[in-house]
Image (cartoon, rainbow, N blue to C red):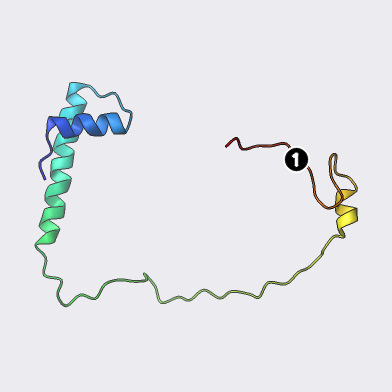
Amino acid sequence: MQIDKDLILKLEKLSRLKLSDTERTEIQKDLTNIIGMVEKLQELDLTEVEPLVYVTDEVNVFRADEVKHQVDRSKALSNAPDKNEAYFKVSKVIDL
């Protein structure tokens, strides 16, 4: 992959950055080095290496969900500033 001035300008626009010419030159060098390192990794023989699925052998232990400390609906709604018979009424917060 060729890291040229056009690519740097495109990345600058996409990331909404304003870079100086010096910064563009530095980033071009850095990205070229990164691509070089990745290409170097491509040379490795990985035929005997199995893909890594999980970093550890640990297994999550989940507990069963239990309903506890349930409040009666009428009690919960008793202090609500605005409600109907079964729900809290709140202001619209998302405009679609």
Q: Which is nearer the eye, 27 or 70?
A: 70
Q: Quadrant of residue 14?
A: top left
Frontmost residue, 84 versus 69: 84
Q: In which quarter of the image is residue 67?
A: bottom right
Position of the N terminus by quadrant: top left
Q: 64 left or right of 88?
A: left
Residue 16: % across, % down: 33, 28
Numbered disc 1: secondary structure: loop
Kindly identify the amino acid type of the residue bearing the numbered disc 1.
Answer: Val
Whether 15 is drawn above or below 79: the answer is above
Percent of width and height locating residue 9: 21, 29
Instruction: State the residue at coordinates (78%, 42%).
Output: 89
Q: Is residue 55 above or below residue 15?
A: below
Q: Where is residue 60 in the image (x, y as percent from the top left)?
A: 52, 73
Residue at horizontal 30 percent and vertical 71 percent from the top: 52
What residue is pinned by disc 1? 90
What is the residue that sits farthest to the front in this orientation?
96
Instruction: State left or right for residue 24 relative to residue 62.
Output: left
Residue that appears at 14% across and 59% down? 41
71 to 16, vertically: above or below: below
How many marks overall? 1
**In x, y percent, where is residue 96?**
57, 37
Q: How crowded is mark 1: few (under 14 residues within 10 Å), some or many (20 or more)?
A: few
